[in-house]
Amino acid sequence: MSKGHYGIHGGQYIPETLMNAIIELEEAYNYYQNDPGFQEELAELLHNYAGRPSLLYYAAKMTRDLNGAKIYLKREDLNHTGSHKINNVLGQVLLAKRMGKTRVIAETGAGQHGVATATAAALMGMECEIFMGKEDTDRQKLNVYRMELLGARVHTVTSGTQTLKDAVNETMRQWAARVADTHYVLGSVMGPHPFPMIVRDFQRVIGREVKEQMLEKEGRLPDVLLACVGGGSNAMGLFYDFIEEPGVRLIGCEAAGCGINTAETAATIATGTEGIFHGMKSYFCQDQYGQIAPVYSISAGLDYPGIGPEHANLYDTGRAEYVPVTDDESVEAFEYLSWTEGIIPAIESAHAVAYARKLAPMMAKDQIMVINLSGRGDKDVAAIARYRGEQIDE
Amino acid sequence: MNRLPQVFSNGKAFIPFITAGDPSLEITEQLVINMAEAGADLIELGIPFSDPIAEGPVIQEADNRALIAGTTTDKIFAMVGRIRQTCQVPIAFMTYINPIFTYGTERFMENCQTVGVDVLIVPDMPYEEKQELLPDCLKYGVTLISMIAPTSQQRIRMIASEAQGFIYCVSSMGVTGMRQELSNNVEHMIKSVKEVKDIPCAIGFGISTPEQAKQMARFADGVIVGSAIVNIIGQYGEDCVPHVMEYVRGMNKATKQQYEKQQ
């Protein structure tokens, strides 16, 4: 009967037209998950194509400057295509190919997931179409061009708020229209089961590596893990192998936009309520009648009114904490990491860096914090310049 | 008393859909009363949703217009209450699961019973998740409709065996909206249903012309038309009532003609 639950969250709330497709996906995933040939091919791609394992870098200057916990950065920004998104995409596109699909479609917010999907599609010879809200195609023009360069068709979504949630709506509609030869490469730990499980499993490599690298470098586990959360894939990938380690604090940083007391926010845990949308029961920013709120964040990748169901459950059980971080704080953190460590983070990841700046000084010097640097910030440079009142051409 | 049994007692059923509050609840009220007069056997009222993932552009825009006009679930309940003072046409609500869940499922169903909503259609609630709504539907006498799609195949048996009222057969892949060509697959889908259970089957998605209605009524028990009507409403706005009436009369006649021939 009902499947894919995390506490009271999760499920499969999608139109009947798509039910056989997600049942088929779950069956294929369960099979290939235990298929040595599939796993070998994926491991090979992650290593030689994506560049894994990603580095765990000790940020000495930042540590000295904040004068508290020892800070490590998990460098997902160094992956091929510049973010953690490639981990999930290589897995899903390889799976789609094994399932005999010839076409992949995907939503994208910041464009990182779209670029990763277009990349994997090019590599594996699949047809690729990407759906992106008009507001995002405007603020992430460079990524639109990158996707087209990689051979994908990019569709501008003009319905609703013209951002990530509307891109998801449109991709679901397009999937329902042509499901036989098409796989929907969902980009986060959200949507109907089995997507939250599949995406988490493919992103789990982040936390698994952190665990090994930490034991190697420090001989012990970290005290705090920090990651930004929109749908929550990079955070889930980092957290998952530490859920059973009660000494490790798990903290997700949500996009508060202009602040959680304003309407211009995307902080789902801080301001949302229980709902059922995009195939899952979870927390959503919505009004009393269940109309999904037009959320806002400077970060296109976190500009989403919901959160993955496993995060919702980690919040319910108290295992993970979720904190809001504003645009202002993130932009400052974006600049801070650039001149402190010489690393320009994605504006999404800068949300986690911003919270680290608050938390690290309150921690003891023998404590350790790991920040997931989920993506690189090249794509955001023009937007941050505009935020600072400077017009530059991309 | 649930009015659903009368829907299919009058030959082939014609089932129009409109979005409540598009362009205003006053017009929706007039449309319901007038469509009943024009021969509609069941009227589907869409409770507008911000993110209707099963709808094509025409109904997406109607939802948008209705929400901008300030339509809420409470105002729609009040409107159905007013309609019921003079009109006993069977009424269905069509909406997504979030507006129901967030309103409070039990409170929603209780209000349906109080004002006289007979049927509920929820496109993003598949068979696997129906326990989310079914207990409260049963408690308050609201018939929860099951849907089958061209991709349902082996699932039809399972879905049909537990279905109530009628089965909503989705004619085509994708979202709602007018289509030139309808698939031949539907006839086969209906046959599969009837093998399992003697339950009426109504076809929706893509039907807009009297010829299509006639063609579908050859093997279906009912014909559901949404986007074509919503399109007329979008075109004429506040002045849409006579135009919708005329269209519904024609479609109703086309749907029922087939039945009379068969008799």
Image: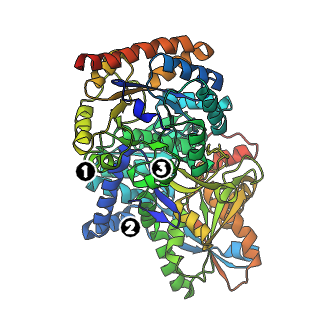
A296 horizontally vs B13: left or right:
right
Chain name for mark 1: A
Amino acid residing under circle 2: His
CA separation in Å, label 3 and label 1: 42 Å
For the residue labelled by badge 2, is the local secondary structure a helix, a strand or a loop?
A: helix
Q: Circle 2 sits on which residue? A: A47
Q: CA distance from mark 1 to mark 2?
A: 24 Å
Depth check: give the residue in front, B209 or B26. B26
- Residue A386 at what x, y percent from top left? 71, 43
Of all chains, the one bearing label 3 is: B
* Placement of the C terminus of chain B among the 4 image quadrants: top left
Label 3 residue SS: helix
Residue neighbourhood size for the residue with mark 3, other residues' Cα within 10 Å, grouped as few (<14), some (14–19), many (≥20) = few
Q: Which residue is mark 3?
A: B138
Q: Chain of mark 2?
A: A
Asked if both marks, 3 and 2, belong to the same chain, the answer given is no
Query: Farthest front residue?
Result: B1
Please, what is the three-letter code of the amino acid marked with disc 3? Leu
At x 31%, y 39%, the residue is B199
- Residue A38 spot, x, y in % from top left: 28, 65
Q: Quadrant of residue B197?
A: top left
CB contact under 8 Å: marks 1 and 2? no
Left or right position of A124 against A146:
left
The kind of residue tagged 1 is Gly
Does A265 sit above or below residue B90?
Answer: below
B60 shown above or below A259: above
Indicate the secondary structure of the residue bearing disc 1.
loop
Q: Which residue bears the numbered disc 1?
A: A100
Q: CA distance from mark 3 to mark 2?
A: 55 Å
Instruction: Look at discs 3 and 1 and give the one toward the viewer.
Output: 3
